[in-house]
Amino acid sequence: MKNVISVWTLLVFGMFGTFGVLESLALSKSMFEPTENLAAVSEKATYELSGLRKRTSWFIDSGTAEVVVEENGDGTGYIATFQFDFESSFSIIPSTGTMRMDVPAEYFQDDFIDTQLADGEIFESEAFKAKLVEDSSGKKHLCQGLEDCVLFKVYDINADFDLGGDDAEVQSLSFVASRVEGLPALKIRSFDLSGKISGLAIRVGGDIVTAE
């Protein structure tokens, strides 16, 4: 009889012990899972500038653009830093340039398009405005070959610019981009940027080549 009790005792403790281990493993896994819908610190994406003249101005021969997203320090959002490096045959265009822009946390949520831009809604922050772009806008090439891709425009940009010490002034900057969930940094696969530098109209198109 004692042996029977001992066997049942072992079975009961074994079952509860197993459940305890499984629960501990589940808790441990949840502790290490990343926060949903938010960008990770120091996410980076690198883009190669397009050689197509409908996307990139004729006086820009080649170049790259790197985008790094980091927390802004107070936990309310992020800062996106754009680093451009140009090979240009036009001396008025700086060979390097940096743009730093605040990006609110809402932008990184997976449902940003559905909750903030659906039905013609315009997303507004202190740093920029954003809205959806129709497929008929002439920017369908930004989503070429992709199924889950959304076109949107960022405009009225309020950012800090550093043009390598040059006195050039950036004006009327905006860009149309293809957003793909799962990509790092700003979730952008391709972009077409336009604006003016010291009054000279400029176009810069880029496509992602590396993501970290």
Image (cartoon, rainbow, N blue to C red):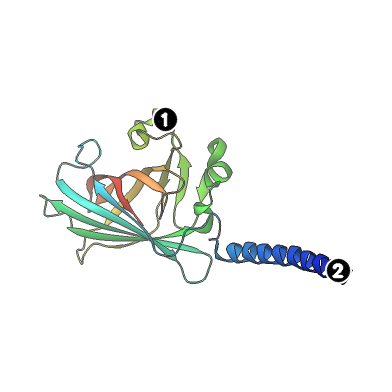
Task: Decide: few, some or many residues near mark 2? Use Cα within 10 Å; few <14, some 14-19, many ≥20.
Answer: few
* Residue at 83% over, 69% down: 3
* Residue at 80% over, 65% down: 12
In the picture, measured across the screen, residue 39 lies left or right of residue 138, that is right
Task: Decide: few, some or many residues near mark 1? Use Cα within 10 Å; few <14, some 14-19, many ≥20.
Answer: few
Q: Mark 2 points at which residue?
A: 5
Q: In the rendered image, which quarter is residue 204 located in? A: top left
- Extreme-right residue of the structure: 1
Q: Mark 1 points at which residue?
A: 135
| Cα–Cα span, label 2 and label 1 | 73 Å
In the picture, measured across the screen, residue 102 lies left or right of residue 203, that is right
- Extreme-top residue of the structure: 136
Total number of numbered labels?
A: 2
Q: Which quarter of the image is occupied by the N terminus? A: bottom right
- Coordinates of residue 195 in the picture (x, y in percent): 29, 47
Residue type, label 2: Ile
